[in-house]
């Protein structure tokens, strides 16, 4: 009999540090910053590739309520330490106007190796993401569910978008972060494997060839974590609003739970070709929730509102079992008032109409991001 996964939950978020008076990024973090954060949060906070970034990770949470409590604590404490150093904190996958070339890389051997290996690609990584870990204890179950769960990745991306701007430009995309990230090797949709051992053989081939040190250098949108017995979702933008983060985490958890229910009945979600899912992935990072995604069964584009209603209905049993019905239904609220990307664009466009000053308009976007990051 198949063992039921633990469906524990862990969330990682990467924040950016800004100067409150200008809204620009902090180029060089003071040496006292990280020790002060670690004093409050221990190993739940770590430096990131660039000195203007900070990463946090929740504890292993049994449900979304625990994740809410822990992530709230992390955001508050990181913001408090940042404020003690004269900085603000924003949760957004890109900064509206900062220049990547002006940022300083954190002094760590791992990051120096990454920069040397990837060159200009690494130096453009002025982006932040959010990763959601769901506990799937069985190795082969993780691989089986990974291939089936790929279908939902564009839907998750669309609902999380927070990166419409890049270097003082409205990019016309709701998730420009994806464009930057896709320049990296070993990114994009997960590949399909018949078993965990087959997956590990492929990883070992790259390790033996000296291409990667371990599976942590495989950066797919969805991957088996090499540190934890989890299936790690990495496609989403970083949500500015805490409630949006929890909605994304709940949606992903419930989708895996639904797939497991099918597995217990010797059924499975239909596997669609990567060509089709890639098309929805493009639509998600170009349009977000506004232009709909392709329903492959019906062979046409369906509005995102209709798609999310169908998804919520599909996972209703799972949302009840995992005690996250409120968080799942928050997806409809996101649609009504817009993702972070929609709201950033609205603030910018309104400010431009009022003042005609793009610098001031971008500053207003940063001010909103700072406020909304801690609005819980």
Image (cartoon, rainbow, N blue to C red):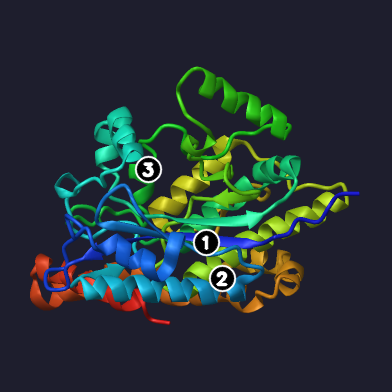
Seen at 30% across and 60% down, the residue is 34
Pick the quarter of the image with the C terminus.
bottom left
Q: Please state if 58 lies on the left or on the right of 74 as rendered.
A: right
Q: Camera-side residue: 349 or 88?
A: 88
Dot 3 corresponds to which residue? 181
Foreground disc of the pair 3, 1: 1
Real-space CA distance between mark 2 and mark 1, rounded to the nearest whole angstrom:
7 Å
Q: Residue furthest bottom?
A: 376
Dot 2 corresponds to which residue? 67
- Of pointers 3 and 1, the one earlier in the residue sequence: 1
Mark 2 touching mark 1, by CB under 8 A? Answer: yes
Dot 1 corresponds to which residue? 11
- Of pointers 2 and 1, the one earlier in the residue sequence: 1
- Of pointers 2 and 3, the one earlier in the residue sequence: 2
Mark 2, secondary structure of its residue: helix
327 in relation to 248, above or below: below
113 in relation to 161, above or below: above
Instruction: Please tell me how crowded label 2 is: few (under 14), some (14-19), or many (20+) other residues with Cα within 10 Å.
Output: many
Residue 59 image position (x, y, % from top left): 55, 64
Seen at 66% across and 68% down, the residue is 62
Residue 95 image position (x, y, % from top left): 25, 59
Real-space CA distance between mark 3 and mark 1, rounded to the nearest whole angstrom:
19 Å
Real-space CA distance between mark 2 and mark 3, rounded to the nearest whole angstrom:
26 Å
Residue 152 image position (x, y, % from top left): 60, 53
Residue 171 in view (yes/no) = yes
């Amino acid at each position: 009999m198949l063992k039921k996964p633990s469906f524990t939950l862990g969330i990682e978020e990467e924040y950016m540090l800004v100067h409150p008076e200008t809204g620009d990024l902090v180029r060089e973090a003071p040496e006292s910053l990280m020790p002060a954060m670690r004093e409050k949060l221990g190993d739940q906070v770590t430096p990131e590739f660039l000195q203007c970034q900070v990463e946090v990770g929740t504890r292993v949470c049994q449900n979304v309520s625990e994740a809410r409590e822990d992530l709230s604590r992390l955001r508050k404490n990181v913001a408090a330490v940042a404020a003690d150093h004269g900085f603000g904190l924003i949760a957004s996958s890109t900064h509206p106007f900062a220049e990547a070339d002006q940022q300083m890389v954190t002094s760590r051997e791992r990051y120096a190796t990454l920069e040397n290996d990837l060159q200009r690609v690494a130096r453009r990584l002025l982006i932040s993401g959010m990763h959601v870990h769901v506990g799937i204890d069985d190795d082969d179950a993780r691989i089986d569910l990974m291939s089936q769960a790929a279908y939902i990745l564009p839907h998750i991306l669309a609902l999380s978008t927070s990166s419409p701007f890049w270097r003082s430009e409205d990019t016309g995309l709701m998730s420009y972060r994806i464009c930057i990230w896709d320049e990296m090797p070993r990114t994009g949709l997960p590949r399909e494997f018949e078993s965990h051992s087959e997956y590990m053989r492929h990883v070992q081939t790259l390790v033996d060839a000296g291409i990667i040190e371990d599976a942590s250098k495989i950066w797919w949108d969805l991957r088996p974590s090499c540190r934890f017995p989890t299936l790690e979702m990495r496609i989403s933008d970083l949500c500015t609003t805490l409630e949006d983060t929890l909605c994304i985490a709940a949606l992903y958890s419930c989708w895996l739970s639904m797939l497991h229910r099918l597995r217990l009945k010797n059924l499975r979600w239909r596997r669609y070709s990567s060509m089709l899912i890639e098309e929805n992935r493009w639509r998600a990072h170009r349009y977000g929730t506004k232009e709909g995604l392709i329903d492959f069964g019906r062979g046409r584009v369906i509005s995102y509102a209709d798609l999310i209603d169908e998804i919520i209905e599909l996972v209703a049993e799972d949302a009840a079992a995992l005690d996250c019905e409120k968080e799942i239904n928050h997806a409809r609220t996101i649609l009504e008032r817009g993702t972070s990307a929609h709201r950033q664009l609205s603030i910018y466009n309104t400010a431009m109409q009022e003042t005609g000053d793009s610098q001031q308009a971008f500053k207003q976007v940063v001010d909103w991001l700072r406020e909304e990051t801690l609005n819980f």
